[in-house]
Image (tube, rainbow, N blue to C red):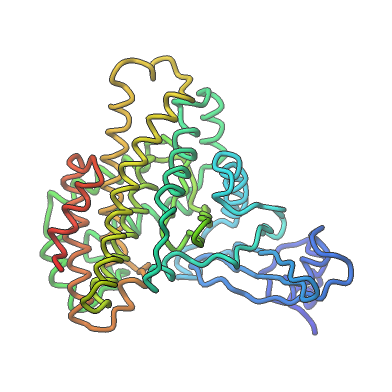
Amino acid sequence: METRGEKWGMSDFQAYFTMKEPDAIEYARTKLDFFAEGAKLTCEEIGDGNLNYVFRIVDENTGKSVIIKQAGPVARISDEFKVSTDRNRIESEILQMQYKLAPGLVPQVYKYDVVMNCCAMEDLSDHEIMRKALMEYKQFPLFADHITTFLVNTLLLTSDVVLHHKEKKELVKRFVNPDLCEITEDLVYTEPFYDCPRNDIFPATRAFAKRHLWEDEALQLETAKLKFEFMSNAQSLLHGDLHTGSIFIKPDSTKMIDPEFAFYGPAGYDVGNVIANLVFAYLYADATLEEGERRDVHMEWLLATIEDIVDTFQEKFAQAWQEHATERTAGYKGFREYYLGAILRDTAAAAGLELCRRTLGIAHVKDIVSIADSTAREKAERACLILGKKFIMERGHYTTGADYVRAIRNEIRY
């Protein structure tokens, strides 16, 4: 069978082209020192994301497998977004850094290919995407512990508090990510807060969005402040897109994937995105589970997980600060509390932004759009916008997990 690469004389992979499944098999056979000679390789494209092509290659003889992820020249969500394929280099290097900072909490990277803009990494097929698992009402008691370790280690240990300032500035330069940052600046901080033609809005929600968000000048001012902080606060090396669709999970393991939006920004952005996506799972359960013990247990677990993440993050952050801080002024009395307080404010704001943009923008979440009953979906979307606005406007008030739980309970009474 002639592959796309062979057709154009590129089967040696010395020039970039967008791979198909046969190309990925040939690439694995000739470019990766991974499979044994004579391996019977099969391939399936498994990517359902917005930006990339993801192939799973399996040796049918042994069951050994690998993932090849290739960056395409345009975003799959819309060809309006032209994105640099350098994002795959950023993702590969970030995963390698995170593998050292938070061992066992990201997949292992085996190879990055600068020509083909692809990387080969550990296959996590024994895990499942967390969003899907939560929509099946599964629970993961270790998740709060795993995610807070990941957040503290990747955020604090890449900051000026710990790194020598010249080393940190070199990392800022190395991970400048303008194309992906522009997507975040537009889709998260700008477009949800006016009647942008590109927004994709559930018709029943439009009037409420107009009244509650677009006509609120005070809210727009706060989102402008937050956008400029996002663009200028090179605090920590972020994952940049840390939601439940970017987490592989099983009962005893959690793996963060897809850090292609990574860059140096405000640390609370990653923490807030995790919280918001657990709120989506909560709203999905509220809309789809029948009254009874199963519903109560699952929804209470989600609230307890949100509370644990906020509180455990602070505990681990304080401990890691004590163990790893090298900056002299970071030891001044009260500075750690000041620094962490700013992260908590950014956390609440980021949670609010995520709730709004996933409701009104072009990148929705299945937790909400798959709610079949239109009345229940409208209720869930209103809750997202109400909570989102509250978290943005009152971001200084959310300092404990109980603060988030109280707000969610007040909005969603069941």
Residue at 51% across, 67% down: 128
Q: Nearer the viewer, residue 251 or 235?
A: 251
Question: Relative to 285, does residue 186 appear above or below in the rendering?
Answer: above
- The answer to whether 176 appears left or right of 362 in the picture is right
Identify the residue shown where x is 37% and y is 30%.
Answer: 318
Q: Is residue 184 above or below residue 383?
A: above
**Image point 66% across, 58% down: which residue?**
122
Return the x and y of residue 56 as percentages of the image width and height.
Answer: 66, 70
Give the side of residue 246 with respect to residue 330, left or right. right
Residue 298 percent location from the top left of the image: 30, 66
**Nearer to me, 366 or 265:** 366
Residue 193 lies, in percent from the top left, at 22, 59
> In the image shown, does 409 or 296 lie closer to the viewer?
296
- The residue furthest right is 37
Query: Which residue is drawn at the image coordinates 32% and 40% (left, top)?
Result: 229
Q: Quadrant of the C terminus?
A: bottom left
From this view, report whether residue 127 is shown above or below residue 310.
below
Number of disc labels:
0
Q: Position of residue 101 (x, y in %)?
A: 56, 39
Residue 29 located left or right of residue 174? right
Lateral position of residue 194 relative to residue 103, left or right: left
Say which quadrant the N terminus sits in: bottom right
